[in-house]
Amino acid sequence: MDQKEESSSSSVFDSCPICLSSILEESYLDQCFHKFCYSCILQWTKIVGSKHCSRQSFVKCPLCKRKSSSIIYGYDGSSFQQHLIYQNSDNSVFFTKTHKYRLQCYYVEPGNSIGNINVLRYWKSNKYRQPNQWLYSWVSREIQALIQEKDVDIIVHHILGAIDSWRRNEPKASKLSPELKQQEFKSMVADVAKPFIRGRTDRFVNELEMFLASGLNIEAYDKVYVNHMGWKISEITTEDDEEPNERNPLIPFLCFSDEDLDENT
């Protein structure tokens, strides 16, 4: 490729596919991560949405036609904003700030642990054999946040059914080490969840394991998680929690890797 062709290719790459000009206020569709001017893709969603009799909660990418439910924009190196394409009033009611907080967790790196949660101790003490009464609600909210759909009962029952079956069939006198038992469990959950959440499967499995290892209910776990990240969310963080917390927020980063993309993209 000569210098002229390379310059032309670079120019096209940096141009918005909608207005064909240089991109202003970079934004990305949340599933394919194709890049547009924020104002252009926002206007695109309005125009496309106006052509449907029933208002939809997703938009098809102008380039690859993949469905996305939100636009990511305003990334400044430490935070980002998200515009949800929830034009349906029923959907907008169910998608709360706690759903948004959980979705944002999948775009940041929390570190190897949250608070005092010791995952390996969870496996060494055989606590994985004990059912968790809050797991259904936690997984339901997690899947709702990830696929941005309200009705996820079938998916949740499928995942929890596999976990219950694995727990019942796990030999009490198994000679597997806690580490191997942990790998076996996480691999099983990943296989079950991947058809529904695709590129976010590994992170979902890690988040699930962290919640189980915590032994906390959802409200307590959210407080620990949010405090660890240094976030302030009115529905989760109380004034008493905020005062002693002098920790600076961890620096989040957007995951624009191939792992977050559909395998068929």
Image (cartoon, rainbow, N blue to C red):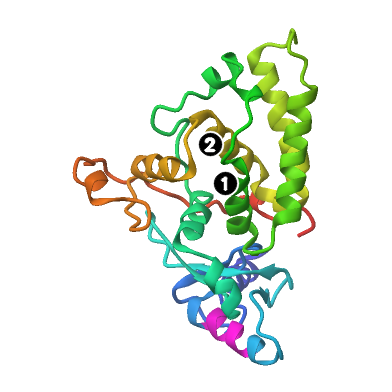
Is residue 59 something one can see in this rendering?
yes
Q: Which residue is mark 2?
A: 211
Please tell me which residue lies in front, 152 or 197. 152
**What segment is highlighted magenta in the picture?**
40-47
Q: Residue at x 59, y 72 (%)?
A: 91
Task: Residue at the far front: name it.
Answer: 133
Q: With 164 as the anchor, is 244 left or right in this view?
A: left
Q: Main secondary structure of the magenta part?
A: helix
Please tell me which residue lies in front, 182 or 128. 128
Q: Position of residue 56 (x, y in %)?
A: 66, 79
Q: Which residue is mark 1?
A: 138
Tell me the CA gap for discs 2 and 1. Answer: 8 Å
Q: Which quadrant of the structure image shows residue 20?
A: bottom right
Q: With 85 as the anchor, is 235 left or right in this view?
A: left
Q: Element at badge 2?
A: helix
Residue type for callout 1: Trp
